[in-house]
Image (cartoon, helix red, strand yellow):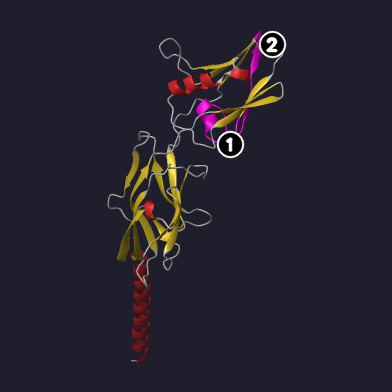
Amino acid sequence: MSLIKSQQIIHINSSFRQSGDDSDFIINIPLKKNNRFNRVSVISASIPKSYYLIPDGENTFIIEENSVQTTVAIPPGNYSITSFIYVLNNLFTGGISHYSVSFPDSKTQAQTGKMTFSHVNAQGHSSCFIFQNDHLPEVMGFARGSTNEFVHVNNTSTLISSNVCNFQKESTIFLHSNLADNGGQDDIMLELFASGNADLSNINFENNGNLQEHSKILKDNQSNSFHFYLTDEFRQKINLNGINVLLTICFYEENNIDSLMTGFIKYLTLYLEEERKNKITKSNIN
């Protein structure tokens, strides 16, 4: 059990930041002078789901054929499985026109959730896909940072996704801040679940009155400048593409009643013991 002695509620809009961008920013927070705040809690948050399934800088993979490498660049943005297959097949042109990709037709085939890549006229050729350590291989059904070789049968080589394709960019995102002292290197303020929200909508969080359930130890109550940033589970920054974040944060001073009661009980026990000894002493004197 705990008691809140004093508090201050602050509304934060990343558009009014001192520096950075909407995904990673430093902002001024005018805390009361001489405050004794020791806890901080997010009351509400509105995070735009404006980040892309395939963002710029994480949109390429390499096809290596007989030690010759070709980079395939997928236009940044959001995709369904249908649009992704269409775009990828259009990219398989020029020197790599003998590649194609397909996905199971749920009307006529078992839906495995995996892509099949084909390399025709592949006799005497060795091919593989090389991926970076980002989300794109997960979209295509492969491990991050992996190299995946085609299997040659007759005159065709085939590569099937090793995992089910993941068309959810981030199911969970994390709000970090140097406000929070969780011990060690953990500065997570809040965990938000995004999978139920449509692309280009908002991920909303409401505390629902339970201030202490999501509270953190306040690291510094004398500073007025604080850092906030959003990441995925791999601590990679999330790009909100210019759409601002809204946060409502409560700073408060918490008194721990359990600690006060323990101190009082200890004092009372010592006092009663002292009284008992005094009575024994007086009785012996008499």
Query: In the image, what residue occupies the spot 41% across and 65% down?
Result: 224
Q: Quadrant of residue 240?
A: top left
Judged from the image, the secondary structure of the residue bearing numbered disc 1 is loop
Measured as percent of width and height from the top left, residue 46 is found at: 34, 46
Residue 115: tell me if it is visible: no
Q: Is residue 105 above or below residue 61?
A: above
The mark closer to the camera, 2 or 1, is: 2
Residue under numbered circle 2: 123
Quadrant location of the C terminus? bottom left
Start and end of the magenta stretch?
131-155
Could you tell me the amino acid type at mark 2?
Gln
Q: Is residue 107 above or below residue 196?
A: above
Judged from the image, the secondary structure of the residue bearing numbered disc 2 is loop
Depth check, front residue: 212 or 55: 55
Res. 262 mark: none
**Residue at the left extreme, as displayed:** 209
Q: Mark 2 near mark 1, Cβ–Cβ under 8 Å?
A: no
Query: In the image, what residue occupies the spot 34% across and 72% down?
Result: 264
Residue 59: tell me if it is visible: yes
User: Does 201 sit left or right of 75 as displayed?
Assistant: left
Residue under numbered circle 1: 133
Q: Earlier in the sequence, mark 2 or mark 1?
A: 2
User: Does 92 sit left or right of 40 as displayed?
Assistant: right
Measured as percent of width and height from the top left, residue 10 is found at: 33, 59
279 within the magenta span: no
133 within the magenta span: yes
